[in-house]
Image (cartoon, coloured by chain):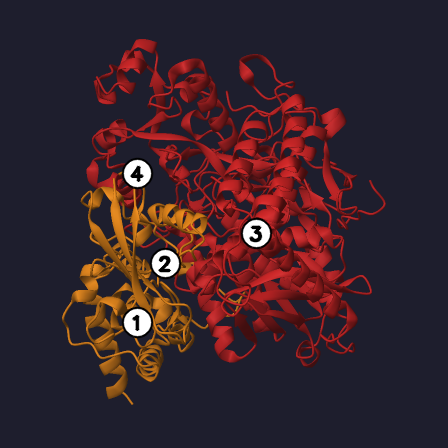
Chain colours: A red, B orange
Amino acid sequence: MSEKLNSKIPAGPLSEKWTKRKSEIHLVSPNNKRKLDIIVVGTGLGGASAAAALGELGYNVKIFCISDSPRRAHSIAAQGGINAAKNYQNDNDSVYRLFYDTIKGGDYRSREANVYRLAEVSAAIIDQCVAQGIPFAREYGGYLANRSFGGVQVSRTFYARGQTGQQLLLGAYASLNKEIAAGTVKAYPRHEMLDLVLVNGQAKGIITRNLVTGELERFGAHAVIIATGGYGNTYFLSTNAMNSNGSAALQCYKKGAFFANPCFAQIHPTCIPVHGDQQCKLTLMSESLRNDGRIWVPKKLEDVEKLRKHAIKPSQIPEEDRDYYLERRYPAFGNLVPRDVASRAAKERCDAGFGVNETGKAVFLDFADAIKRLGKQRVAERYGNLFEMYEKITASSPWEEPMMIYPAIHYTMGGIWVDYDLQTTVPGLFAIGEANFSDHGGNRLGASALMQGLADGYFIVPVTIGDYLSNKFAEPRPDINAPEFIQAERAVRERIDRLFAVGGTETVDSIHKQLGHIMWEYVGMARDEKGLKKAIEEIKALKEKFYTSVKVPGSQFEFNQELEKALRLEDFFEIGELMARDALNREESCGGHFRVESQIEEGEAKRDDKNFMYVAAWEYKGEGKEPELHKEPLKYEFIEVKTRNYKD
Amino acid sequence: MNFNIKVWRQKNAKSKGHFETYPIAGIEEDASFLEMLDILNEQLIREGKDPISFDHDCREGICGACSLYIDGRAHGPDDHVTTCQLFMRHFKDGATITVEPWRSAAFPVIKDLVVERRAFDKILQAGGFISVRTGSAQDANNILIPHDKAEESMDAAACVGCGACVATCKNGSAMLFVAARVSSLALLPQGRPEAARRAKAMVAKMDELGFGNCTNTRACELECPKGITVAHIARLNREFLKAKFSD
């Protein structure tokens, strides 16, 4: 292991590590908690739950978000559900199985200890959420209902129609509101973090831009928690919300926090296909649909031709001429294989010419069998709102004809490197939820993002941060007039001035679209050495073009959405380059990362455990310099590492 | 498709606003309303003009950020959608489309079509929660909730906090928004201990923040993107009266 990385995994049996760590952690007494300030950036599931839990404990919390209300964070859009090892279905589920499925689903590139802890606290999350009044789906007896998600053979997913993320976020937001009312938390909506401030090498504050007035502001604290989600919007087109960005994470990287496994991005198999070049956002159709929907393309190319010309309807193609390719290739898991596997299989069929729409980039997700088997009412109860959403967007009814779907960028498993305490390589800086890298390895299983955000926020970081803060209460609050703060603010000001000084003619979005094309082409579903090297060069060239041709209208001292986008795009260039660099280094196929050079027959991924069973953590070395790679070897002491097999 | 977009322009909270009309051409009928505005903004920037500011984020009808009053209707001419789920196929080719921000005393304009909705957060901070401390919950299946009650609670919990109900109400009342939260929690056993306190505190805060009274015109339920009905307002009224009588 690189000497700069200490994962601080507690010794001892897997199931006792978290208990052991908790018993070692120094406590902060209630009267001392009052003297400690914590900044939380981001108000999604991770940020809102962490701020609420820390407020309950008695710390002084300041929470920041870019939207007009904490409730808008993109966790709200998660549809299908949240996993928990409750075994309410009596289907032999357990903490161990949830742990095992997550490690295997992640293609053996996540940490055993972190993942086990995640599974361990999962049950308490459901208890907490029910107590908050979240209206989870119920059976007629009044007990909680469950469904299945990809990559598992039990039913452990709790859900609230197709709006589970919304309900969980509204629960966390309600707890946050409770603490705001109690005075322990102060919220700063429409504030964007633009830099991290270090004093003596420790995280002591942030610089923000007030998005309404344009003023730069300095905020100090004894610790900073980053909960700003992932960087999927590097690709321009993704299922992320329009304002989701990787900037806070990138600022931390530039201030010394290592960035881990940036190339691990998840491509979700069930999204509504791209309809034209005026589009700016892709819409996800929940993975829960794969519980009952069957994925297929025609067996015959002549049927494909007819479909593209609208000469026949999909329902007119007879059963024997349909290729249910997931059921054919992966009989044991069928339509519920993990996302990376399902996405690659869709791409394989479309590349072979079987794509069912005009662009050749779509496959069918068909509910005809489910409607026959379950009846319309039960299908409507499970997926009614998703069917409606699909029909609103495409003007085609899933009740009549199958949905058309295609893979799209959805989630990023990579993120800021953290140790077992969720602390980054910068003391006092913590990262939680999608913003960190730790739990999902090369591929995240469905319904696990919500689980991780709330596990980190409610149950892990409020405990582990105490260890760092236990000797800080005697320290005075950081002085925001100290030279470190003044200097950081000046640097942000110069960065903004530079953007206005360009005075070019191209819009931010038009350049972002070009970055998206480079990323999807070379750092998308299939990557090779030549393409990745080309991507790095093209991103550099595009970035230079940005600094000579971008047009940022208006002024910085007003509400200015173009300036917000320009600042985020600057950071997407660097993230995109880092992703390509990491993908180039990882000469294996693993999870969502598929290197064309590394495959076995039928296009199945070939992992290389001998050479790549490590976390790649990148250290920033300065503008224009190559980052330095540090390796954290992954040791699997408690499970046997196998080739992933969803066939039998 | 081609359109004339007549849109409210206002530099900031202090300045006076006015309408401006911009022509736009070559829009696909499958483009969403907000994609059309994106394209218009690209055009304005290239012409050296200030682009139109508007709130938006998820673009799939769930975050509640988008908030446009289009041709006299909150979220435009389609039923039960947010603006981001409105598609250009619902407009006639060549039409002039009028776009305004939410108009409500409690939602001041920040810029152009962007308004300040912090009043909603304040109402929820007054009592829109269950006071449960993290870690103190019992096993989830110890609380049994009949299927239909959970579904009804979920109907109300679907509120996205966009403010269409306020924008569309002639009195500028936030009753549907308040009722959705009160009703969702009042239907569940977990929400009962604080039900009376919650109803009184949220209604008092709503009044304090300058929202108008409800006169049962039911305009709000017609425009609610999530189809939340005034039956929840009836439940709020019952909860509120029960609380007042027991004072």
Judging by the rendered image, the residue that carries numbered circle 2 is B64
Residue A520: % across, % down: 53, 31
Q: Is residue A54 left or right of residue B182?
A: right
Q: Mark 2 falls on what kind of element?
A: loop
Judging by the rendered image, the residue that carries numbered circle 4 is B26
Q: How crowded is the residue under tag 1: few (<14 C-alpha within 10 Å), some, or many (20+)? A: many
Identify the subunit bearing mark 4: B
Q: Mark 3 falls on what kind of element?
A: loop
* CA–CA distance in space, label 1 to label 3: 47 Å
Q: Is residue B165 left or right of residue A181?
A: left
Amino acid found under the numbered disc labelled 1 = Val
**Nearest to the observer: residue A150 or residue A256:** A256
Tag in front: 1 or 3:
3
Judging by the rendered image, the residue that carries numbered circle 1 is B178
Q: Say whether marks 1 and 4 touch (CB < 8 Å).
A: no
* CA–CA distance in space, label 2 to label 4: 28 Å
Tag in front: 2 or 4:
4
* CA–CA distance in space, label 1 to label 4: 42 Å
Tag in front: 2 or 3:
3
Amino acid found under the numbered disc labelled 4 = Gly
Q: Mark 4 falls on what kind of element?
A: loop
Question: Are the residues under marks 4 and 3 on the same chain?
Answer: no
* CA–CA distance in space, label 2 to label 3: 34 Å
Tag in front: 1 or 2:
2
Amino acid found under the numbered disc labelled 3 = Gly
Identify the subunit bearing mark 1: B
On screen, residue B15 above or below A114: below
Judging by the rendered image, the residue that carries numbered circle 3 is A503
Question: Are the residues under marks 2 and 4 on the same chain?
Answer: yes
Question: Are the residues under marks 2 and 3 on the same chain?
Answer: no
Amino acid found under the numbered disc labelled 2 = Gly
Q: Say whether marks 2 and 4 touch (CB < 8 Å).
A: no
